[in-house]
Amino acid sequence: MDTLEAMRVFVAVVERNGFSAAAQALDMSTAGVTRQVAALEKRLSTRLLHRTTRRVSPTSAGAAYYAQCVRLLAEFDALEASIGAQALEPSGTLRINAPVSWGIARMGPLLAGYRQRFPQVELDLALSDRLVDMVEEGYDVAIRITREPSPALIARRLGESRVSLCAAPSYLAAHGTPQVPQDLQVHACLGYSYWSAGDHWPLQGPGGEVKVAVRSLLHANNGDVLREAAIAGMGVILQPDFLLHDALADGRLVRILPEWEAAPIGIFAVYTSRSHLAPKVRSFIDHLVEVGV
């Protein structure tokens, strides 16, 4: 048994939820896929998959083995790709993770442009504001919007975004417009759940940096929800401009305290290792840098 080939077959079965779909993707017979998985289970002396007439799903041992297979196969592919990488056309499946709001706003055109340049690459995008484990979950590259990327990852800066205070005209008409940062303490604010500063908003302006303890009537782990709540007149938000651009342009939101903002937030592409970087990963990151985010 070719163990690497069997691992690839097993990964395909898990990712496509069945033997037939995996066989079609791998250009194999369903019987051949079944034999490969059975041989792998025999070699490991453990059951890797639950099989029913409707679906196939990994056992607990299978889920753990799948995560390691994805990592090992990625490392093996990267190793092979590093030999004569300049002559190799990017190909294979590129698994990407990105934050929900930024991904909705930006990723569609970026992926379309990349696919036009590199048609041999199949793209698999997952949007999540959760901080994913790239190794365990098998992502090739992730977009992180943060001021300090994890030192455990390799990060390439793609750009940055302003972080501005905004509110709807209807809210300001009803409650007044803050004139200094401290005025925010008596206003309704809408807070982002994953922000490390919590309800102590750090602002930079003419007087240096201040931290204002605000009263958040709503916490949410998604910026789109906070923006829409602000547009509806619920309160003041402090959010990146990639979320605010359209609402500011058409007047649904207006900037307040325009001389005071949070420090710009960086947009990074992160990956797990510089060694044997697969052409599909390198080309995707280079594409993001070239076209701008």
Image: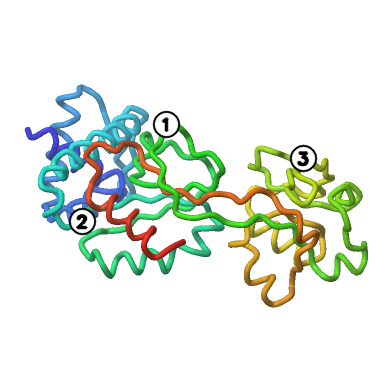
Q: Among all residues in the image, which is located at the extreme left? A: 1
Report the amino acid beneath label 2.
Pro
Q: Position of residue 202 (x, y in %)?
A: 73, 43
Residue topped by disc 2: 90
Q: Which mark is residue 200?
A: 3
Q: Among all residues in the image, which is located at the extreme bottom? A: 250
Report the amino acid beneath label 1.
Ala
Residue at the (69%, 70%) spot, across then down: 248
Residue at the (53%, 64%) spot, across then down: 105
Residue topped by disc 1: 152
Residue situated in front as seen by the camera: 72 or 87: 87
Residue at the (24%, 24%) spot, across then down: 46
Q: In the image, is residue 258 above or below residue 193?
A: below
Q: Position of residue 53 (x, y in %)?
A: 30, 47
Residue situated in front as seen by the camera: 113 or 233: 113
Residue 268 placement, left or right of 88: right
Residue at the (8%, 35%) spot, across then down: 2
> Is disc 2 placed on a helix, strand or loop?
loop
Residue 27 placement, left or right of 254: left
> What's the image's color scheme?
rainbow
The image quadrant where one finds the N terminus is: top left
Q: Among all residues in the image, which is located at the extreme top? A: 45
- Label 2: how many residues lie within 10 Å, few (<14), some (14-19) or many (20+)? many
Report the amino acid beneath label 3.
His
Of callouts 1 and 2, which one flags the residue occurring earlier in the amino acid sequence? Answer: 2
Q: Are marks 1 and 2 in contact (CB under 8 Å)?
A: no
Residue 234: which quarter of the image? bottom right
Q: Position of residue 181 (x, y in %)?
A: 84, 50
